[in-house]
Amino acid sequence: MPTIGVYSDYSKPLREYKAKQGQLNKRTIMLWMGDARNNYLPSEEKIFKDLCRRVKKCYWLNPEAKSKWNTGDSVIGRYTPYVSELA
């Protein structure tokens, strides 16, 4: 649960997944859930791209309205080319 002073940083879990990438293979389905608002921190798009290429499918569930995607600190557009489906 977020608290004061805690902000989204998708680069951290992406780096953690990268460290475990040996466990990912073409039988893996990767699911991301979140608004992709990164508080202007690095998106680590290259890591996301590499992870998506290793797995069978990569899905992203974004709870925000599409009209808010790619506005402000949203980096969903950087991840979109690599996901199997975005909803």
Image: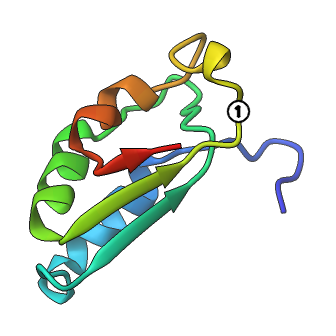
Where 33 falls versus 77 (above or below)?
A: below
10 Å neighbourhood of mark 1: few (<14), some, or many (≥20)? Answer: few
In terms of secondary structure, where does tag 1 sit?
A: loop
Quadrant where the N terminus is found in the figure: bottom right
Q: Where does residue 66 sit, x and y in percent of width and height?
A: 61, 22
Residue 19 horizontal side relative to residue 16, left or right: left
| Residue at horizontal 18 percent and vertical 71 percent from the top | 56
Where 72 falls versus 21 (above or below)?
A: above
Where 38 falls versus 55 (above or below)?
A: above
Where 22 falls versus 49 (above or below)?
A: below
Q: Residue furthest right?
A: 4
In the image, what residue type sits under mark 1?
A: Glu
| Residue at horizontal 28 percent and vertical 41 percent from the top | 44
Q: Where does residue 65 sit, x and y in percent of width and height?
A: 70, 26
Residue 38 horizontal side relative to residue 78, left or right: right
Looking at the rendering, which quadrant does residue 20 occupy?
A: bottom left
| Residue at horizontal 19 percent and vertical 81 percent from the top | 24
Q: Where does residue 74 sit, x and y in percent of width and height?
A: 54, 23
| Residue at horizontal 46 percent and vertical 51 percent from the top | 60
Residue 39 or residue 56, whichever sits in front: 56
Residue 39 horizontal side relative to residue 47, left or right: right
Residue 19 horizontal side relative to residue 32, left or right: left
Q: Label 1: which residue?
A: 64
Looking at the rendering, which quadrant does residue 78 occupy?
A: top left
